[in-house]
Image: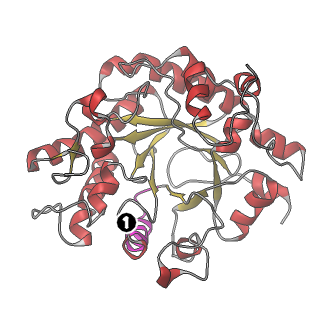
Amino acid sequence: MSTVNLFEPLTLAHGPALKNRFMLAPLTNLQSHPDGILSDEEFRWLTMRAEGGFALTMTCAAHVQARGQGFPGQLGIFGDQHLEGLTRLAAAIRKNGSVSAVQLHHAGNRSPKDLVGTPVCPSDDAETGARGLTLGEVEQLRDDFIAAAIRAEKAGFDGVEIHGAHGYILAQFLSADINKRTDRYGGTPENRARIVFEIIDGIRSSCRPDFQLGIRLSPERFGLKLAEIRELARELLHQEKIDYLDLSLWDVAKEPVEEEFKGRTLMSYFTELARGRVKLGAAGKIMGVQTAREVLEAGCDYCIIGRAAILRHDFPNRVAADANYQSPPLPVTAQHLRDEGLSPAFLTYMSGWKGFVAEEAA
């Protein structure tokens, strides 16, 4: 397969097509204001990636409730006070020829107490001190995800992605280890996944017909079982209400952690599923042309670029210009990252990633 395949347009069931096979991962970066309003630093970071050739530019996780905040400086989408910044961002992404999306998020029991007070969870959680949601609160959570999508549409975004991965609140509902509810949102895998399908149905019925909708899932860790997440993915693909499924795999080449599934890649358990009109992509250490090609050859429709997009804002353009392109070796200097649009807050965050940022001489 030549690199030209990476630059074939990809038509989605709703909304605009992607001009190539590169989607910007929704990357935590701590750059927005304490109230969730978009900062100039966050605006610059994202618009640089749109300019750099990404077919779809996705925001970091944006919280749909104030008490769902997961980290300092998180972008918000829980109130109309966020509309002005979001509208400015959507227009700039479009102006740069990229499709725009907001990732919708609630951290659940992963919300820091110093930001939200007592965090909430599908059930009381002794380990984190999180309080279990009442039935009414679960319904409100569902409705607030839907309201956030409507807000993104109003701001001019092409679509949204539902964050169902990484142990945040929707993944907490999916986990039998964490979700001990006895009502219609707990118990069987179908009940634990109910809120996900209700959010999807609500967004589809509330937003315009060409509004794009994706979901991010991680198939393991955080109390999740591969077999259950695979069945969830199968049903999501079968219903064809979403446009794309975004698999966060940590490493696209890794095998599953569960012993009975070893012997093949984690990704292969999803690429073999019938997907109809839904597109499938994966994230996890895609740092250059070769790995990106391999992801498409393995059956994915597109690649989700995280670390490589931090290292080079124009990763897709560099791939287009160099059939052997590979990301710069780690660690990189702080100045390199500043030049790539990282703010001081984002740079400090990345300095906590072992081996990513070179230590500066005193």
> Which span of residues is magenta-colored?
229-242
- The percent position of residue 257, horizontal first and vertical second, equals 50, 72
Vertical order, 362 against 185 (above or below): above
Q: Is residue 342 magenta?
A: no
Three-letter code for the amino acid on which mark 1 is drawn: Leu
The quarter of the rendered structure image containing the C terminus is: top right
Residue identifier under label 1:
224
- The residue nearer to you, when weighing 270 against 264, is 264
* Residue positioned 52% across, 45% down in the render: 15
Q: Quadrant of residue 42?
A: top right
Left or right of 67: which side holds 97? right
Image coords of residue 116 (percent x, y): 26, 30
In the image: residue 313, left or right of residue 81: right
Q: How many marks?
A: 1
Q: Is residue 226 left or right of residue 309?
A: left
Q: Where does the image place residue 206, in percent across and percent down from the top left?
A: 29, 42
Q: Is residue 189 above or below residue 251?
A: below
Could you tell me which residue is drawn at 17 percent across and 69 percent down? 187
Between 334 and 226, the one lying in front of the other is: 334
Magenta portion: prevailing SS class:
helix
Q: Does residue 277 appear anywhere in the picture?
A: yes
Q: Residue at x 48, y 84 (%)?
A: 260
| Residue at 13% over, 63% down | 184
Tell me where residue 285 appears, x and y as whole percent: 67, 54
Nearest to the observer: residue 312 or residue 330: 330
Q: Quadrant of the N terminus?
A: bottom right
Given residues 14 and 4, the one toward you in this image is: 4
Q: Do we see residue 66 in this rendering? A: no
